[in-house]
Amino acid sequence: LHQQFGNMLNERTYADVKLRADDEVLFAHKCLLASQSPVFRAMFDREMLESKTSVIDMRDVEAKTLKYFLEYLYTGTVDGMDDKMALNLLIVADKYQVSSLVEKCSTFLKSALNFDNVLSILLVADLVNYEPMKVFIIEYIVENSSEVLSLPNWPQWMKMNSLIASEVLLKLSCKFDSNFKKKYVKSVSERFKEVFVSAVIHVPPVNSQKKEQVAGSSKEASLPPVNSQKKELVAGSSKEVLKQSQELW
């Protein structure tokens, strides 16, 4: 079926509307455009100028992009798309509310993401306000912050796009703050463990205390109760641990 629709597009069979871009005119079918795009449907339903003259002036779309756009509307596929064309198509698909093409372009751009195109793609994602793609790209920048922030065009890009740049910097600050806290807590935890183990090692075994008590009645009389010794030892250990742990702070 898609192949037959593609043939209708190429052969202009029963075409009843014209799309004009860059002084180039492409032929299409109102019923198919309306079925794929709510924006086209509204144009034809409301008896707009385009509906009366059967000419739609696509001033903000390049002719090459329009051809790819029509190809998708008729066949559901886009052959030979690169990252630049995907960006252009994403803008057109968003404007004409073709959600399936928005998703297709987004998936393609995510897979094609690199240091050379990441800033351009983020701008378009922000322009069309496509949040899932925007979040994905910002996370990519955060994970590769040393490389992205070292790009020659980063300072100028940040000045020209201060709002979206502030979102990126906010995410970066959250990441660095989180990493610092994790490392600090881990360091303190490990140091506390060392101090605690060191303190416990100095506590003599209880059995050895009992043997010394059994050895002689005179010693037995002079020795304080085992429980009081244990309390003093534990108290001493706790104070040492507390003191040393406080020094870490």
Image (spheres, rainbow, N blue to C red):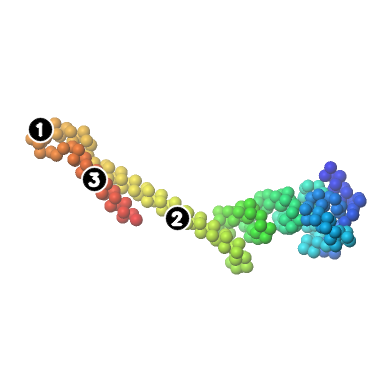
Position of residue 198 measured from the top left corner of the image (x, y, whole percent): 29, 45
Mark sitting on residue 114: none
Please name the residue shown 85% across and 64% down the image. Answer: 23
Q: CA distance from mark 1 to mark 3?
A: 28 Å
Q: Nearer the viewer, residue 244 or 201?
A: 244
Left or right: residue 209 versus residue 45 is left
> In the image, residue 243 lies at what x, y percent?
28, 52
Upstream in the sequence, badge 3 or badge 2? 2
Secondary structure of the residue carrying tag 3 is: helix
Q: Is residue 218 left or right of residue 178?
A: left
Label 2, secondary structure: give it. helix
Q: Tell me if 138 is positioned left or right of 178 in this view.
A: right
Q: Quadrant of residue 97?
A: bottom right
| The N terminus lies in quadrant | top right
Question: Which residue type carries mark 1?
Answer: Gly
The residue at the point 60 percent across, 68 percent down is: 159
**Residue name at image x 25 percent, y 46 percent:** 237
For mark 3, does the 10 Å Cα neighbourhood hold few (<14), some (14 to 19), or many (20 or more) residues?
few
Q: Residues within 10 Å of mark 2 (few under 14, many from 20)?
A: few
**Residue 56 percent across, percent down from the top left:** 84, 60
- In-front residue for pair 151/20: 20
In the rendered image, the residue lying farthest to the left is: 218
Task: Report the quarter where the C terminus lies.
Answer: bottom left
Whether 241 is drawn above or below 174: the answer is: above
In primary-sequence order, the first of circles 1 and 2 is: 2
Check disc 2 and report the residue beneath it: 180
The residue that appears at 75% across and 52% down in the rendered structure is 98
x, y (%) of residue 77? Answer: 77, 48
1 vs 3, front mark: 3
Callout 3 amino acid: Ala
Q: Which mark is residue 216?
A: 1
